[in-house]
Amino acid sequence: MRAALEAKRRHADVALISKVHPVRSHSVAAQGGINAPLSAGDSWESHAFDTVKGSDYLGDQDAIEFLSREAAQAVVDLENMGVAFHRGPEGKLAPRNFGGASQARTYFVGAITGHAILHVMFEQLLKAGVKIYEEWFVTHLAIEGGFAAGLVAQEMLTGKFHLIRAKAIILCTGGCGRVYEPSTNALICTGDGMSLAWRAGAPLMDMEMVQYHPTTLANNGALMTEGARGDGAQLRNALGDRFMIKYAPNKIDLASRDVVSRAAQTEIDAGRGVDDGLGGKTCVYLDCTHLDRDFILERLGEIYELALQFANVDITRQPCPVRPGMHYQMGGIKTDLDGATRIPGLYAAGECACVSVHGGNRLGANSLLDTVIFGHRAGAHAAEFARQVDFRPLSEGVVMESERRAQAVLSRPANGESIAKIRLDLGRTMHQHAGVWREVKGLQTALNTLYTLKERYQKAPVQDKGKVFNTNLVFHWELGYMLDSAETILLSAIHRTESRGAHYRTDYPERDDQRWLKHILVGYRPDGAPTIEYLPVTLTRWKPEPRVY
Ligand SMILES: Cc1cc2nc3c(=O)[nH]c(=O)nc-3n(C[C@H](O)[C@H](O)[C@H](O)COP(=O)(O)OP(=O)(O)OC[C@H]3O[C@@H](n4cnc5c(N)ncnc54)[C@H](O)[C@@H]3O)c2cc1C
């Protein structure tokens, strides 16, 4: 939405396509806040360094510098558009603490920051007159003569496929969280744009870097925001110990997410886990009980509700069982600072992209920031690009190709294996072998399983044969995209024989700057195994150092 708004402001003719109503995008679930070095005594350098360190030195420092320099203005812009950020007693914007940050710089609206931002953005789109095609599902990216030329989308209400010609396309299709099961991500986070771009010839970078958030609810994987620890909540093991003191003596509960997730998992594996309510000891406690009840309800109201409804825990009175769970994809479609991919006319921004500000581990509240900063930038550059080029000739044949694919799937006999079963098997396999701990045997097992899942997918039927809102068919398209994301995650994870950020290899437990201070890019080949390429990490002013919190 930020990209569309910027392109529109620069007089481009813009359409926004979304498979859900725009305010139902996963950004609506963002809880904790958005970072900016706005307060007195803070600086963009400090924010940038925290981000570089958080990334375990894999983030490109030119991109991180840009992010941090622009952050204050971006948050003020949101505020001016109407996002009612929390204010302190003197009436000034007042941030909360967050993980991996050397000072409080996370601006928030209770625990519904994403909701607040998304609704304001949507109003801005309406005001600017951006055309919106909602509940249109993109099935194909058309590339002509090496340039992005348009796309095919299925109108879900009617089942009809449409060709949309474009001089420039910006993919802002979000993450691929549901490749894992469980995940904090919405069901729609299926990596569609990553797969579309990949198959069109744009490589995916840093895909092995999958973030596990330390505090997700045991039974359904829902997120309990880091803002809780930012506001004073503590992690405890079965003995009641604040175990983080041992792992991160300075930052304790507010070390960066990869560090806290590994610590929690280590406690659980060592038998110091707490009851998950499902018969296992797979959790640790997130303890808010020492905080004032009204304070919790005002600032953390949403997670109070989540815990009550899904775990039957009143966090104002009882510690809440939580465990590390899949949360965020640091990698994505490789872009430059303008959001440009390697395909002229194709841009990407937000979680689907990898401009490389998060590296091996994203800091909490840096992702909403990434979306608005690089959304803005991609919108500006795509508008400029569109001004300079003509539409490419594109035949209706590309629509027929999507129709043919849909027809082929719909004509499979209805009695085969369900898409949902394959999806669940995929998610469980990824969680088991490519989660907090990884090693070559497990990763290879997962990759072999993935290839059998791809075969099963080729035969799986779509039960609903109708045209109107065929969500079975949408699920089918999505699973195809997910299998691509999973493949690139596993290939990159097998390749990186070191431990860095969220990628922890028990068979290679050390960070190895000599060999691995570089990005892994996976490219698609229609007939053959994916390609692997390396790119050096851009360092500006911060040399890699040991990372302690
Ligand atoms: C529970 C939760 C809490 C979070 N909290 C925070 C936080 O407090 N602070 C923070 O900085 N980050 C947070 N994050 C991360 C952050 O919210 C996301 O990374 C970010 O919002 C992603 O935004 P996006 O615009 O890239 O994608 P999304 O918001 O996921 O939007 C993707 C869009 O692409 C569309 N789309 C996708 N595929 C297709 C297709 N095939 N056809 C048509 N349209 C398609 C969708 O309809 C949607 O509109 C959180 C994430 C989660 C899951």
Image (cartoon, rainbow, N blue to C red):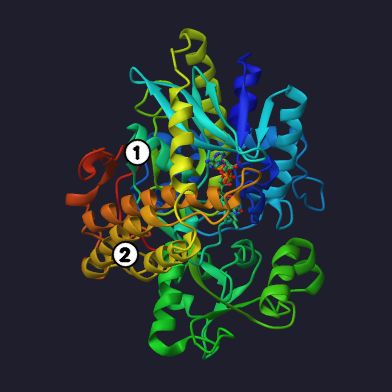
Q: Where, quadrant-wise, is the C terminus in this rendering?
A: bottom left
The percent coordinates of residue 259 (x first, y second) are: 42, 66
The answer to whether residue 208 is visible is no
Q: Which residue is mark 1?
A: 541
Going by the numbered disc 1, the residue's amino acid type is Arg
Whole-percent x, y for residue 346 in the image: 43, 26
- Helix, strand or loop at disc 2? loop
Assess disc 2: are there few (<14), some (14-19) or many (≥20) residues with their C-alpha within 10 Å of its C-alpha: many
Q: Say which quarter of the image contains residue 437.
A: bottom left
Mark positioned earlier in the residue sequence (1 or 2): 2
Asked if 486 appears above or below 312 in the picture, the reply is: above
Q: Which of the image's four quarters has the N terminus?
A: top right
Tell me the SS state at disc 1.
loop
Q: Give the Cα distance between marks 1 and 2.
A: 26 Å
Q: Which residue shows up at 69% across the image and 50% down it?
A: 113
Q: Residue at x 33, y 17 (%)?
A: 145
The kind of residue on which mark 2 rests is Tyr
Mark 1 crowdedness (10 Å alpha carbons): few <14, some 14-19, many ≥20: few
Residue ID at (61%, 39%): 159
